Amino acid sequence: MILDKKIIDQHNNQLKDKHKRSFDYVSADVPQVGEILNKLQNFQIAIPSWALGTGGTRFGRFSGAGEPGTLEQKLEDVGLLHALNKSSGAISLHIPWDIPSDAEKIKALASSLEIGFDAVNSNTFQDQAGQVHSYKFGSLHHVDPKVRQQAVDHNIEVINYGKALGSKALTVWLADGSSFPGQLNFREAFQNTLSSLQEIYKHLPEDWKLFVEYKAFEPYFYSMTIGDWGQSLLLANKLGPKAYTLVDLGHHLPNANIEQIVSLLLMEGKLGGFHFNDSKYADDDLTAGSIKPYQLFLIFNELIDGMDVKGIDHASGLGWMIDASHNLKDPLIDLLQSVEAIKIAYAQALLVDREALKQAQQANDIVKAQEILQDAFRTDVRPLVAEARLRSGAALNPVQLFDEENLRNKLIEERGVNSVATGL
Ligand SMILES: [Mn+2]
């Protein structure tokens, strides 16, 4: 579905007076407002193709309606999000759920919707129909070289699909691990993983990045072969300059200090990208910023600090993506909420007075340091984020517009009630 620009203009007209009042109020105290708005306009967060349908838990899945049943429809959904917020200008494809059988046609559709292709994702965490070897006991770390080779070949195939579309990164997340002590030899599992990744790395184009994702537990509960940022960083360092660590917010043990991890990975030049979501207990895959918005702000505070020190462009230097699952809310609305939360945290972090913070740190003035951070966090930056959207031609309030225009019902009319997205 293509959203008529007139609908967005009408919506913006209705809200513009109220918006102007709140924008004028906030921006009066922000001297660098023009620069912040530019950065907000440039900052895009990729949408994963698997998040467009309803997710489930291991106990069940309650399907939504009018889900995108084809890759073309998934692109259209991301195009719709991007029309609403002008902040979701890329899709991240998962192979084999989204094989682009006609790459040129898919590229043309994406470019008509003004969306690009973010990292491609391989899947060795489940068996596909007709697959020769099973991944039941792992893939790249498997004790059997034939299984490892099959998983390596799959990743090379994913790179080739990505090349055809213009992707520039491969994300590898492995469901390799063990659930019982004694099941695995840790060193052998790690070495097998390293040599498999080295094979994949050889096929990575010069201008590509390899993102090595880690996860503390699940689907295995005793050990994960790439279980934390240390293991991921070890692999990335051994692989070479095109390999980076990818941080998924839900992939840590409870209360891990993710902002500190981010800071050190950036210092080492090895932070490749992000998967945004939120959680209370584990890999809950909830809407970004819905549970711990202060943590999200603190992460962005370190990101900006670390990127600015190295002169890394905020918008293009790292891979930014949502990795969430929506089993209660409408996936599209949920994604709009996540993008909004990410941009709010980014805007708040842009407000931090870095010079004053540095002085407070040097003087061991803890009170001042806390005041500086919380001043920024407690500023209502929503009008800044909305103004950036307005200047980009998007809606002042995307969630409200989605609701007012009954966009889900229109998708159901187009696709039917029973249309189900491929994926988990
Ligand atoms: Mn992830």
Image (tube, rainbow, N blue to C red):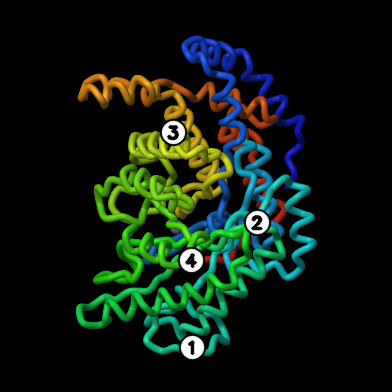
Q: Is residue 405 left or right of residue 148?
A: right
Mark 2 or mark 3, whichever is nearer to me: 3
Q: Kindly indicate whether the residue at mark 3 contacts the one at mark 4 (C-beta within 8 angstroms).
A: no
Q: Disc 1 designates what residue? A: 133
Q: Disc 2 designates what residue? A: 74
Three-letter amino acid code at disc 3?
A: Ala
- Going 71% across and 59% down the picture, which residue do you hit? 72
Residue 226 spot, x, y in % from top left:
35, 67
Three-letter amino acid code at disc 1?
A: His
- Going 73% across and 70% down the picture, which residue do you hit? 101
Mark 1 to mark 3: distance in Å?
44 Å
Q: Mark 2: is the Cβ under 8 angstroms from ligand 1?
A: no
Checking the image for residue 172, the label placed there is 4
Residue 267 spot, x, y in % from top left:
39, 45
Q: How many marks?
A: 4
The quadrant of the rendered image in which ligand 1 is seen is bottom left
Element class at badge 4: strand
